[in-house]
Amino acid sequence: MKNDLPKRKPNRLKGFDYSSDGAYFITICTKNKEQILSRIVYDKTVGANIVRPSAIGKIIEKDILKIEKIYPCIFVDSYVIMPNHIHLLLTIDTIRRPMVAPTIATVIKQFKGAVSKEVGMSVWQKGFYDHIIRDDEDYQIKYQYIDENPIKWTEDELYNF
């Protein structure tokens, strides 16, 4: 019997060491892209859209901030908690904090598991998306993308109202 299910494509760059020093842009989506993490609201005092995390979003933020404590050679440079996904900009730096670095997949697996356990339900879709930061310009582009994501929410490919 032929299997008609679509084959899952690998998300990782073949042969790349995901525990090597450098910066990584990560996107993790909610299961079924449910909008349970936050709301994007217009704030008149700021004059722009801002993120209002839900109860689940607050747990996620707490667990994002724990990443550096659990993995001292990993720095959370920036993040945003959107309604149905999060973006993280992580840097592995074993020079400033000498130690064996975990892979990005290990960090994300631990993070997703901790959030789901604390929330009491499965929050995330399988896997995650990554982009290996190639240079300072690439880093600045991703940093700005995270910073501006709430402002441009209705233009986001994950926006699904």
Image: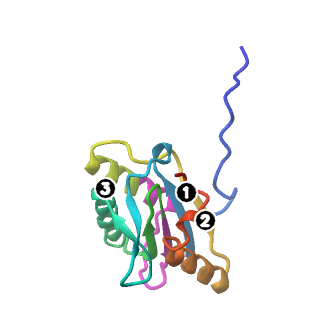
Q: Are marks 2 and 3 in contact (CB under 8 Å)?
A: no
Sequence order check, earlier mark of 2 and 3: 3
Residue wearing tag 1? 159
Q: Are marks 1 and 2 in contact (CB under 8 Å)?
A: yes
Residue wearing tag 3? 56
Q: How is the image coloured?
A: rainbow
Horizontal and vertical percent position of residue 53 = 33, 64
Q: Amino acid at mark 2?
A: Glu
**Residue drawn 45% across the image and 63% down it:** 82
Q: Nearer the viewer, mark 2 or mark 3?
A: 2
Question: Marks 2 and 3, how far apart in space?
Answer: 24 Å
Residue 127 visible here: yes
**Residue drawn 54% across the image and 79% down it:** 143
Give the extent of the magenta segment: 87-109
Would you call the spot at circle 3 few (<14 residues within 10 Å), some (14-19), or many (20 or more)? some
Residue wearing tag 2? 155
Under circle 2, the secondary element is helix
Would you call the spot at circle 2 few (<14 residues within 10 Å), some (14-19), or many (20 or more)? few
Would you call the spot at circle 1 few (<14 residues within 10 Å), some (14-19), or many (20 or more)? some
**Residue drawn 64% across the image and 56% down it:** 12
Q: Amino acid at mark 3?
A: Ile
Under circle 3, the secondary element is helix
Under circle 1, the secondary element is loop
